Amino acid sequence: MTITDVAREAGVAASTVSRALTNPDRVNVVTREHVQQVAARLGYRASPAARALGTGRTATLALVLPDITNPYFSGLIRGAERQAEATGHILVIGDSEENARAEARMVERLAPGVDGFLLGSSRLPEAKVLQFDAAMPVVLVNRRVPGVTSVSPDQQGGTRQIVEHLVALGHRRATFLAGPPESWLGRQRWAGISSAAKKHGLKVRRLGPYHPSVEGGLLAGEAALADGATAVIAHNDLMAIGALKRMKARGVSVPGDVSIVGFDDIFGADFCDPPLTTLSDRTEQAGRSAVDLLVALVREQARKENDAPADIVAPTQLVVRGSTGPAPTTPPPAPNEGPVR
Amino acid sequence: MTITDVAREAGVAASTVSRALTNPDRVNVVTREHVQQVAARLGYRASPAARALGTGRTATLALVLPDITNPYFSGLIRGAERQAEATGHILVIGDSEENARAEARMVERLAPGVDGFLLGSSRLPEAKVLQFDAAMPVVLVNRRVPGVTSVSPDQQGGTRQIVEHLVALGHRRATFLAGPPESWLGRQRWAGISSAAKKHGLKVRRLGPYHPSVEGGLLAGEAALADGATAVIAHNDLMAIGALKRMKARGVSVPGDVSIVGFDDIFGADFCDPPLTTLSDRTEQAGRSAVDLLVALVREQARKENDAPADIVAPTQLVVRGSTGPAPTTPPPAPNEGPVR
DNA sequence: CAATGACTGGCAAACGTTTGCCAAAATTTG
DNA sequence: CAAATTTTGGCAAACGTTTGCCAGTCATTG
């Protein structure tokens, strides 16, 4: 079922069919409708490969993430997928497994077949990001690099909210459990926390890095206990939940003995025990915006324009739940030597 | 950077470059290595569009799911993505939003650009599945249709485990909270539960359908309370967690007053309060197997072979956690009229 | 040493679109 | 009504590969 079949059936040239379907103003209304009808009747669908070969555009966008299974990314994936569909694009997905090398390989592997990239929480060194951005349309999500289009959540405001919340509860010493050093968001979080903490007279020590997963959180939680602070701020909710689990296993009361705060407000944060206080952002919206920006970039590139790159900073909001409470008046008890599970 | 550039630089014909890179036995070793070296030096990557146009194969597979954000699918997505990468394929992803129409449209939209489909928990009517399967390579995941290649978790054995577990705990009456009627897995679950229940003298009533989400579970939980059984079996973990939340809001003790069982063992099932007893399957493995089957189908199609379709049934395992316990000796108390939140 | 067969590399034809260019037709303008 | 302009549709080239066919070379066999 090719364009030629439609052309023959409709009694016109293939070029007319092409125009009737993709450039309707270029052809007389009666011819156009006839052709469209014939095409519909025959169930004709243009070959994306042939079209791509002719135009150089694939109508495909790539989304690459460090960990597809992190629920935090579900919203991003869904938002990106919906908006891709809405703009007539196909979304391909890649998992870099928290590895900068793998991420670069993935981009290079996918590049010839897509019009542009959405790099979510990219672990790439900045030079590599710039190199890719120079070569093709790129939109960063959860990361900012000067000169590169991006959408990221407001970490400065968010971390300030966290610190103020803890200080208001009477905490004087906190522990920050760091994620991978390659995480830009993680670096922002630490920077925001430590600057806000200084301003409010909160002492905060950084531990890590840890793998940004529940497993990493288990280890981190143990270290946090040893550190002895009354509040723990984890790199993300996965780690916060891991830390929570460890506290529970050790018989440490949350938030009685220690308060825990996470980032992301992932699925599960509201029904773990206790529910997690965490910094929330609208990832689905971010996915949509990022796709819109990317589509615009692809079009601009076609027109050789070059505006200043957009740089969306999305609001964040602290969701206070049960894992944070007033600082204990007495120092926290030494954790049980109970089974560690 | 086209094949012609490489050919010129290497001093051979384009066809030789093509063969040296994709069909190495077809060219002399010294020529081959020279060409490969030149190609590498120039950073040449074949255009997927051009290749697809010539060969009719895109090296792309599609995975379509009813709900990308359901954590249950994370494992499937990751497994499929990894295996796709391992077999030199690209994975595109589509969300049908629990809607059969949308699913069919998605398949039709994606079809011209991919070599085959992975349909996960397909909501399509059987006739549509057969129609698609006749037209292109299709592998079903979490569904079986006679004559169509599939991989699905063993629901019969799984539901038996659940019923035996509840009966052993002394439960005599259970409520099954149904998901969407389009869900094949849901129908299997009900069939398995009711047949095993009959065998063991457990009375079980079906309520629903409900949307297979936490929100659906909130509603379903309310209905389950009204039904008065001592055990609740939910269509999936999302619903089970929703029901759990509702029980808690209503002051009903789990598992003291009522036991709850889910399906899927999703992220969060182990740290909700109480942790959820649920039927687990290996989704990442399923994703991998499904891709392998699909890749084999694509190859077979190219060779016009036609074996009997494979039909993998993967084992399931009941994970017993805190949400199930002995049936209460006295009938459960009437739920509080407290705030429902 | 002639005949046969295996290897090797090039030519050119596909694959299915899009699009620049052109000419014919239709419409507007003077 | 003629000239100028716009609209319309066809022709053919281009996009970058793969692959069938062919001819030349080289090795093997009788």
Image: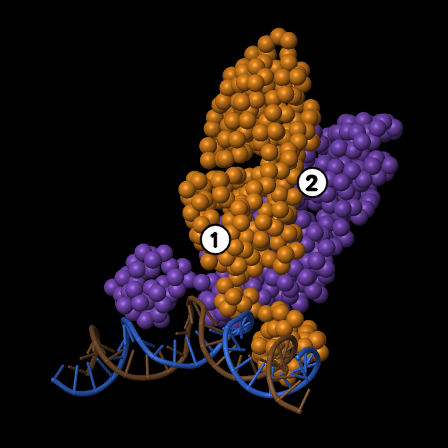
Chain colours: A purple, B orange, C brown, D blue
Dot 1: what SS?
loop
Q: So how many labels did they put on this image?
A: 2
Mark 1: amino acid: Met
Q: Is residue A173 visible?
A: no
How far is the residue under mark 1 from the one under mark 2? Answer: 42 Å
Q: Read off the residue under disc 1.
A: B136
Q: Which residue is mark 2?
A: A237
Residue A156 in percent (x, y) is at 68, 49
Q: Quadrant of the C terminus of chain A?
A: top right
Q: Chain of mark 2?
A: A
Q: Where is B60 relative to B121, above or below?
A: below
Is residue B35 placed above or below A271 in the rendered structure?
below
Q: Which residue is painted at 31% across and 67% down in the image?
A: A8
Determine the image quadrant of residue B260. top right
Image quarter (top left, top right, bottom left or bottom right) of the N terminus of chain A = bottom left
> Which of B144/A273 is in front?
B144
> Does residue A338 appear in this view?
yes
Q: Residue at x 68, y 52 (%)?
A: A66
Q: Position of residue C14 (x, y in %)?
A: 44, 72
Q: Nearer the viewer, mark 1 or mark 2?
A: 1
Question: Which residue does the image show at 72% across and 60% down from the upper left?
Answer: A101
Q: Measured from the top left, where is residue D6 in percent x and y?
A: 28, 75
Amino acid type, mark 2: Asp
Q: Pointers 1 and 2 in contact (CB under 8 A)?
A: no
Q: Which residue is at the front of the view, A160 or A248?
A: A248
Q: Chain of mark 1?
A: B
